[in-house]
Amino acid sequence: MNTKMKRRLILIAGIPGVGKTTIGNFLESKYKYKHFDMEKYHRTSRIIKNVDKFIVKYFEKNKDIVITWGFSPDQKTIDVVNLLHKYGFKIFWFDGNRNSAGRATMQRKTFDEIVLKKQMQALDKWNVPKKINAKIINVFDKKGNFRGITKITKDIDAILIRKSFYN
């Protein structure tokens, strides 16, 4: 990761099964980011009620932050993501081979296949990457295999250092 930037604030969202948490954990262990996994803490409703308080409590004192968040779209959640963007978070959307992502999700045994299908349809219907102004990263290669943590991290870093991302 680029070390010239003063503070790195990243939010990684995306379809289920694309490695959001894996990348967040990697950034925490290798690059000393504070990783906040929204799915792990189940605090979404409290965050939505008072985003400013949430940001001050968890992020004001941390230099580099990565939030990972796999969410079902609704206007309140999209508003929270857009507010994080206003606070300086760079928003990434992980996507790619939907069959590979679905298989990875079902291997975790935390999703019902019907729920997964409904969530994927909702994400597409809402056109979430566009609504949250996210930079899209395809985490799969042409054969549908996960591209790997190092390659995906380099993609994130390349986007972060592009001047156009900050405009």
Image (tube, rainbow, N blue to C red):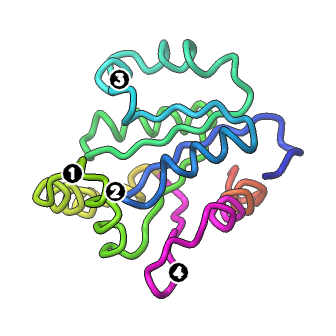
How crowded pointer 3 is (Cα within 10 Å; few <14, some 14-19, many 20+) is rated as few
Asked which secondary structure carries label 2, the reply is loop
The answer to which of 82 and 13 lies nearer the viewer is 13
Q: Quadrant of residue 9?
A: top right
Q: Residue at x 32, y 44 (%)?
A: 71
Q: CA distance from mark 1 to mark 4?
A: 24 Å
The residue where tag 4 is placed is 141
Q: Circles 3 and 1: CB distance less than 8 Å?
A: no
Q: CA distance from mark 4 to mark 3?
A: 33 Å
Look at label 1 and name its amino acid: Phe
Asked which secondary structure carries label 1, the reply is loop
Q: Circles 2 and 1: CB distance less than 8 Å?
A: yes
| Vertical position of residue 103 compared to residue 110: above or below | below
Q: CA distance from mark 3 to mark 1?
A: 19 Å
Pointer 3 or 2: first along the chain: 2
Pointer 1 or 4: first along the chain: 1
The residue where tag 1 is placed is 111
The residue where tag 2 is placed is 16
The residue where tag 3 is placed is 43
Question: Does 152 lie within the magenta span?
Answer: yes
Q: Residue at x 56, y 18 (%)?
A: 58
Residue 91: horizontal and vertical position, in percent?
Answer: 54, 48
Q: CA distance from mark 4 to mark 2?
A: 17 Å
Look at label 4 and name its amino acid: Asp
| Vertical position of residue 23 compared to residue 79: above or below | below
The image's mark for residue 93 is none
Question: Does 39 lie within the magenta span?
Answer: no
Q: Circles 4 and 3: CB distance less than 8 Å?
A: no
Residues rendered magenta in the picture:
133-155
Relative horizontal placement of residue 38, taking residue 84 as reference (left or right): left
